[in-house]
Image (spheres, rainbow, N blue to C red):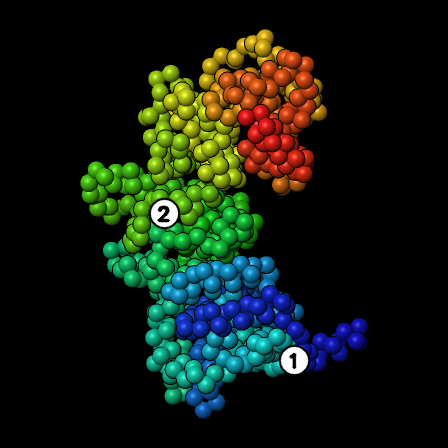
Amino acid sequence: MEQDQTTQSAAETREFSAEVGRLLDLVVNALYSDREIFLRELVANAADAIDRRRFASLTEPGLALPQDAGVTIAPDKATRQITISDDGLGMGREELIANLGTIARSGTRAFGETVRDAKPEDRPSLIGQFGVGFYSAFMVADLVEVISRPAGEEAAWVWRSAGRGSFEVAPAERAAPGTDIVLHMKADADEFLEPMRLQTIIRKWADHIAVPIRLMRDGKAEPANKGTALWRRPKSEVTPTEYEDFYRHLGHFFDKPWTTIHWRAEGAMEYAALLFIPDSPPFDPVEGERRSKVRLHVRRMFITDEADLLPPWLRFVQGVVDTEDLPLNVSREMLQSTPVMARIRKAVQNRVLTELKTRASEESKAEAGPIAAEDEDAPAAEPKVDGYLRFWENFGTVLKEGLWEDAGARADIAPLLRFRSTTEEGWTSLADYVSRMKPDQTAIYMLAGDDIEQLRHTPVLEGYKARGFEVLLLTDAIDAFWPERMGDFEGKPLKNARQALADLGAAEEVPESLKPLIEGIRNALADDIAEVQPAAHLTESPVMLVSNAEGADLHMQKLLRRAGRPAWGGKPQLDINPRHPWIEALAMRAAMGESIEEEARLLLDLARVQEGEAPMEPAAFIRRVVSAITAGKTAS
């Protein structure tokens, strides 16, 4: 124990994790031309620390904020330093090491690749997207010190680094809980030592932060931000620029929102909401944290961004919901169980879906003429950067998760879906598909796979094309699962094209000339397939694998295997095309008593390749292909 105490009371130098080392190099070198965002990032972090201390104090009164709590920015030309101080929750030794010396999640390599590929004007937004805002301090400083004292504790610690591979943590002193970030400015960063320049940056990026921000000028602390609750103001009094500025502060974005939804509910429930749907997706919209981060406020006070105000399948929505109907000391348990929160969640979800339906409807009516302006009660939609298809390409994959997870929302999500098709250019909807159905067609046919071009050329589609039946093509992993849950659209069943081949007509009778071949294939592949059948639905390809009508189809089985899960569904059936020249030639050989075992193996491997699978034995497959080609040349 004495050894541990000695270690924690002395200065200690540590190496950055490899990820942070690479990250620092990327931030400084790739984003160097947009250095003013360092102030936005550090001020936003400071304000967040104050909000979190305020929330913690609701259940721990000893953590209460001082009356004048806020963020203070103090430039000092004489020492070439800028100090950013806050009265927030503070950090102890272990938190400084964990939060500033390592990155909680992987992704640095992806960050670097994205930076390299991005246009110069798009690069600043990457800092916010990847959650690495603190490190932007090294754009302007050649030494950064973080002096912090956790609320409720006496000990303070300093973290310092020049951003070149290592950092030091040592005991320090701070009169009150909170954090000071001291930036020792680089020689070419003089502009940021000017109070007027700092004021301009604060007004640009942090004017809507509710926490007071003070800027030191000539020894006096002057207010630097308005700190107004934008969501509480009437829509008619908020300009598009103000919406954009708040959106950028809220989500650390640099673009404009794809749409803005601002409204106030009064009556049975009282709350104000200001929500945004981004114009571009985050780095990992699907694999990232599956949780809504819409902020909950009570009477303007930030409470939490973990209230799950929207379901996971709407997690791309950013914003604030501020209610009058909860106490300031609301507990996490109350957030999950109170009827008030349940009603607010439902109302917010419905409003987002209403906006999406409106935008989708506008897209479909675009060729019919201009759209009437929205009334005051409709969701605000300024600025509209692009049409609904832009939203779909950015967030459609996430939205479809709701079809799988939320039975009550399927009817609302279904009109929002868009698909590629075998007959249409671009995207199409379920409603448009139904309007094009053939008189003798009773179902909506869908085909899921990994690649759109591979799907367009799969043998599965041959029979549908021959009948004139349109098939919707789906390429997201979730597409293998949700259609079964959804069931139907406007009374038309959704069917997997792989498992609905019987809809294309009666099964083909097995001619006598084909029976020896079928028997030979069946015997050669008994361990790998369930059955061999002639297929009327094949018009060009010699062979294809067919899923069992029950259970997982071949694509779903592949996805399950990738995820390390059992792939139920049984052995596939091998369908052969009796009209294909190769099959005809094999039938003649089988009828004469020749062995067709090698050809049967080749047929199976070809069918697997058509499904995007590897041959059973790649070396043997190559040998069989070469042998077949050689035999064909000899015969000719």
State the image coordinates of residue 590 (x, y, percent, origin top left): 64, 16
Per the image, label 2 sits on a secondary structure element best described as: helix
Quadrant in the picture for residue 633:
top right
Q: Estimate the spatial distance between the alpha carbons at disc 2 and disc 1, rounded to whole Å.
A: 52 Å
State the image coordinates of residue 549 (x, y, percent, origin top left): 56, 22
Quadrant in the picture for residue 242:
bottom left
Q: Is residue 258 visible?
A: yes
Residue furthest to the top in view is 512
Q: Given the image, on which type of amino acid does mark 1 rest?
A: Pro
Q: Which residue is mark 1?
A: 171
Q: Given the image, on which type of amino acid does mark 2 rest?
A: Arg
Per the image, label 1 sits on a secondary structure element best described as: strand
Front one among 237 and 191: 191
Q: Is residue 433 above or below residue 182?
A: above
Q: Is residue 328 above or below residue 578?
A: below
Q: Is residue 213 above or below residue 109?
A: below
State the image coordinates of residue 425 (x, y, percent, origin top left): 34, 36
Q: Which residue is mark 2?
A: 390
**Considering the image in quadrants, where does the C terminus appear?**
top right
Question: Residue sitting at 48 percent across and 89 percent down?
Answer: 79
Front one among 566 and 65: 566
Tell which tag, 2 or 1, sits nearer the viewer: 2
Residue furthest to the bottom in view is 78
Q: Is residue 58 visible?
A: no
